[in-house]
Image: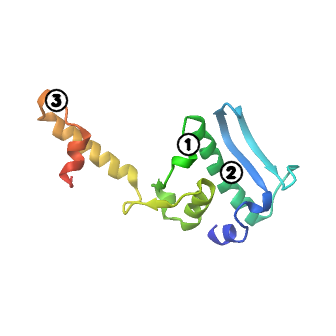
Amino acid sequence: MAKMCAQSPVGNNGAIGFYYQSPERSDETGDKSGVWRFDAAGKPVDSFEGPTEVRAVLEGKFLAMRSFAQGIGMDPKEVKRIIATGGASTNKSILQVLSDVFGVPVCTLEQSDSASLGAALRACQGHLSLSAPGGFAPFSEVLARGKI
């Protein structure tokens, strides 16, 4: 995937795709699923060559994320960086496309599987809450400990 992505330039020579395998619900799409591809002239096409398809999938997904984020109030001028987590955060090609679409650096955590880290931190909070006044320990107390 990384090699194929590298074979098509940032912006994909104007080719863009929208890939919704399950209904996508937004003001722009309504409640639709399907695949739509457009060439640089904005004309619908049935398919792309491999490298163009790979970049179109990535750029299309990240453009949808950016559009959604702006729709709920994110101001692109205020975004200074993105912190990527999860399995895809280990893929430098995906991170580069994310950075290109949002126009900011993308950082990662030492722990790529952030779901397990988050679950462990919440479990620690639950344990601390058992003996906390009022039965609740703020999450900041967990973080202040520096370890689980």
Q: Distance between the residues labelled 1 and 3?
A: 38 Å
Question: What element does badge 3 sit on?
Answer: helix
Q: Dot 2, how many residues are within 10 Å of its Cα: few (below 14), some (14-19), or many (20+)?
A: some
- Residue at 54% x, 41% y is 74
Q: Name the residue under label 2.
A: 60
Q: Which amino acid does label 3 sit on?
A: Gly
Q: Which amino acid does label 2 sit on?
A: Gly
Q: Where is residue 124 in the image (x, y as percent from the top left)?
A: 22, 44
The tag on residue 75 is 1
Asked if the residue at tag 2 contacts the one at tag 3, i.e. Cβ–Cβ closer than 8 Å, the answer is no
Residue at 14 percent across and 27 percent down: it is 134
Q: Where is residue 19 in the image (x, y as percent from the top left)?
A: 70, 47
Disc 1/disc 2 C-alpha distance (Å): 19 Å
The answer for how far apart the CA atoms under marks 3 and 2 are is 45 Å
Query: Which secondary structure, mark 1?
Result: loop
Residue 45, placed above or below residue 105: above
Asked which quadrant contains residue 103, the reply is bottom right
- Please state the horizontal and vertical placement of residue 115, each as a whole percent of the image: 39, 49
**Left or right of 39 on screen, residue 23:** left
Residue under numbered circle 3: 135
Local packing at callout 1 (Cα closer than 10 Å; few below 14, some 14-19, many 20+) is: few
* Amino acid at the residue labelled 1: Asp
Residue in the picture at 51% in, 50% down: 79
Residue ID at (59%, 66%): 93
Residue most extreme to the front: 77
Q: Is mark 2 on a helix, strand or loop?
A: helix
Tell me which label, 1 or 2, sits earlier in the chain: 2
- Quadrant occupied by the N terminus: bottom right
Q: Residues within 10 Å of mark 3 (few under 14, many from 20)?
A: few
Q: Examine the image and state in which quarter residue 72 appears.
A: top right
Is tag 1's residue or tag 3's residue first in the polypeptide sequence?
Answer: 1
Above or below residue 129? Residue 147 is below
